[in-house]
Image: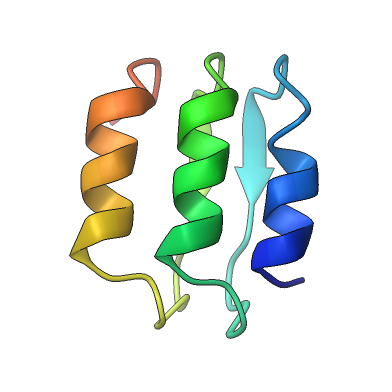
Protein backbone atom coordinates (compact mmCIF):
# COMPACT_ATOMS: atom_id res chain seq x y z
CA UNK A 1 0.00 0.00 0.00
CA UNK A 2 1.21 3.48 -0.87
CA UNK A 3 -0.21 7.01 -0.88
CA UNK A 4 -1.53 6.30 -4.39
CA UNK A 5 -3.47 3.34 -3.00
CA UNK A 6 -4.86 5.50 -0.20
CA UNK A 7 -6.02 8.04 -2.77
CA UNK A 8 -7.93 5.23 -4.51
CA UNK A 9 -9.38 4.09 -1.18
CA UNK A 10 -10.46 7.67 -0.50
CA UNK A 11 -13.02 7.26 -3.30
CA UNK A 12 -14.93 4.90 -0.99
CA UNK A 13 -17.00 7.61 0.67
CA UNK A 14 -18.99 5.12 2.75
CA UNK A 15 -15.85 3.57 4.30
CA UNK A 16 -16.16 3.34 8.09
CA UNK A 17 -13.29 1.05 9.18
CA UNK A 18 -9.73 1.00 7.91
CA UNK A 19 -6.74 -0.90 9.29
CA UNK A 20 -3.34 0.25 8.03
CA UNK A 21 -1.21 -1.15 10.85
CA UNK A 22 2.51 -1.38 10.09
CA UNK A 23 2.41 -0.08 6.52
CA UNK A 24 5.69 1.73 6.09
CA UNK A 25 5.01 3.32 2.67
CA UNK A 26 2.09 5.57 3.55
CA UNK A 27 2.53 9.21 4.54
CA UNK A 28 0.40 12.14 5.62
CA UNK A 29 -0.48 12.84 1.99
CA UNK A 30 -2.44 9.60 1.67
CA UNK A 31 -3.97 9.91 5.12
CA UNK A 32 -5.22 13.40 4.30
CA UNK A 33 -6.95 12.11 1.15
CA UNK A 34 -8.77 9.49 3.23
CA UNK A 35 -9.67 12.01 5.94
CA UNK A 36 -11.08 14.52 3.46
CA UNK A 37 -13.15 12.08 1.41
CA UNK A 38 -14.23 9.32 3.81
CA UNK A 39 -16.70 11.25 5.96
CA UNK A 40 -18.07 8.12 7.67
CA UNK A 41 -14.68 6.87 8.85
CA UNK A 42 -15.11 5.85 12.49
CA UNK A 43 -12.26 3.40 13.12
CA UNK A 44 -8.71 3.85 11.85
CA UNK A 45 -5.66 1.85 12.91
CA UNK A 46 -2.32 3.52 12.12
CA UNK A 47 -0.09 1.71 14.62
CA UNK A 48 3.52 1.53 13.45
CA UNK A 49 2.94 3.74 10.38
CA UNK A 50 6.04 5.79 11.02
CA UNK A 51 5.97 8.16 8.03
CA UNK A 52 2.77 9.90 9.09
CA UNK A 53 3.60 13.24 10.66
CA UNK A 54 1.62 15.96 12.42
CA UNK A 55 0.02 17.24 9.20
CA UNK A 56 -1.65 13.87 8.68
CA UNK A 57 -2.99 13.81 12.21
CA UNK A 58 -4.18 17.42 11.92
CA UNK A 59 -6.07 16.46 8.75
CA UNK A 60 -7.72 13.58 10.60
CA UNK A 61 -8.66 15.85 13.49
CA UNK A 62 -10.15 18.46 11.15
CA UNK A 63 -11.88 16.33 8.49
CA UNK A 64 -12.63 12.96 10.11
CA UNK A 65 -15.20 14.14 12.62
CA UNK A 66 -16.70 10.65 13.10
CA UNK A 67 -13.50 8.97 14.33
CA UNK A 68 -14.04 7.21 17.64
CA UNK A 69 -11.59 7.81 20.45
Residue sitting at 30 percent across and 41 percent down? 59
Q: Quadrant of the C terminus?
A: top left
Location of residue 21 (image quadrant): bottom right
Location of residue 6 (image quadrant): bottom right
Residue sitting at 47 percent across and 60 percent down? 29
Residue 20 at x, y = what percent? 62, 61
Q: Is residue 30 visible?
A: yes
Q: Is residue 41 above or below residue 28?
A: above
Residue 50 at x, y = what percent? 40, 82
Residue 64 at x, y = what percent? 38, 26
Residue sitting at 47 percent across and 35 percent down? 35
Residue 22 at x, y = what percent? 58, 78
Q: Is residue 68 visible?
A: no
Give left or right: position of 61 versus 14. left
Q: Is residue 57 above or below residue 33?
A: below
Q: Quadrant of the N terminus?
A: bottom right
Amino acid sequence: MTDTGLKCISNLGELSDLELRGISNITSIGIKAVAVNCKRLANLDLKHCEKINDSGFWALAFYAQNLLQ
